[in-house]
Image (cartoon, helix red, strand yellow):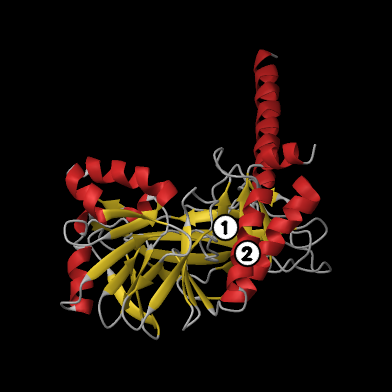
Amino acid sequence: MKLAKILLLLSLALIFTRTFLSNAAAQDRPPAINPHAPTVATPTVYPEPGTYITTESVALFCATQGAEIHYTLDGTDPNPSSPVFDPYKLLWVGAVNDGDQGLKTGYTIRAAAIKSGMNPSRVATFQYTIDRADKTTYVAKDVLPGVIMIHDYANDKMFLLKGSRKALLIDSGMGTGNLRNVVRERIGSLPLEVIFTHFHGDHTGQADQFISDSVEHIGAADRAQVVDMLRRRGVNQELIDRNLVGIQEGDIIDLGERKLRIYEVPGHTPGSIVLLEEATGYLFTGDSVGSNNPTVPDAFWLQFPSSPTVDQYLQSLKVFRSKARGKVKYILTGHNDHPLVGETYLDNLQKAAQEVVDEGINVLVPSWRPPNYWQVIVGDRLHDPDWASINVNRDKVAASKN
């Protein structure tokens, strides 16, 4: 009798265990295939899989409306328990350096989509390689007639212009190589001046390489931060006082046969400036009117506690545009790989600011970058090369409407 009871208990335990394991496994499996039901579309991705030189964001899409996209980053098949893709929380494939040396890093993203009442999609596999350059590396190329674009390992952009009497370097990135030699190879013995669109380190990082024998210009309201950086690099105060010059609205940089006018457009920083070469319609902006790189979604950054309100920035932008109306053909920013169509991008940027002023938080969506902020978007980053967005401080926007 005792043996029979033991066997009965063991049998019941085995049935319970099988049922539990079966139910648990079912939670991790896609729904069963139903030959009479439609199949969810296979997920697609932006940007295309391939090799890139710096950190990129990845967005997943499904043509089946209302489908939920599950993904993995470890090479395994996704299932209903895998993370769900959030279109405002992009996936990042990061660039890696070991000291100054750039590393080549591979990433595999696998994705499948599900929707109630439909068969699950096929699993899609997307492979990326980030081939990071050494921090000492600079790449120079002609991007427009008479404009040499130089980018560093982090893809920060600098621009080199040559006139008949001297050359001008706009911004200096944040690499650790000999940028001065790269510039000299392009300009020969021409005297060089340097100008910074604002004080942030990805635009002034190599200022110490040029200040000993070149005048450096910075918006007057940003000068103190560059002074601090140069001091930390060991540049003596006498040299700073002599060669770091504040610049302001209306000043002209004359290269001989090429002239660039300075406009103040405060917002990203208090001393942010842009440079307009009216003869060509080239506007060099750094971050002063933002960037819109689509694969590392860029915006005009106005989210800092010290930033002006959107309304204040909008007024600055309108003042600049009233002075430069019809003169801007191309915009060269600090982070775009290609020039933007000038008036089109500025129209979109102004429209974005105006929407926030008019509608407040109702037009805001979560920011792609950096996270935990909010933004307004005009245009489609996947299809419109001149789309624009502005990152804002949501609390400040809400307060302005009360």
Is residue 40 shown left or right of residue 391? right
**Residue 299, numbered circle:** 1
Looking at the picture, does residue 331 appear above or below residue 375?
below
> Seen from this angle, which residue lies furthest top?
2
Looking at the picture, does residue 8 appear above or below residue 286?
above
Q: Position of residue 359 (x, y in %)?
A: 80, 51
**Residue 213, numbered circle:** none
Q: Position of residue 32 (x, y in %)?
A: 74, 57
Quarter occupied by the C terminus: top right
Residues 238 and 123: in front is: 238
Residues 365 and 198: in front is: 198
Is residue 206 shown left or right of residue 261? left
Image quadrant where residue 189 sits: bottom left
Q: Which residue is mark 2?
A: 388
What secondary structure is found at the residue carrying circle 2?
strand
Residue 263 in sight from this viewpoint: yes
- Residue appearing at x 55%, y 60% in the figure: 297
Residue 366 in sight from this viewpoint: no
Q: Position of residue 156 (x, y in %)?
A: 38, 62
- Please rate how many residues cluster around mark 2, counting C-alpha atoms within 10 Å: few if below 14, some from 14 to 19, many from 20: many
Residues 42 and 202: in front is: 202
What secondary structure is found at the residue carrying circle 1?
loop
Instruction: Return the disc, 2 or 1, that comes first in the chain's sequence.
Output: 1
State if disc 1 and disc 2 touch (CB < 8 Å): yes
Q: Amino acid at mark 2?
A: Ala
Q: Amino acid at mark 1?
A: Ala
Image quadrant where residue 349 sits: bottom right
- Residue appearing at x 61%, y 71% in the figure: 345
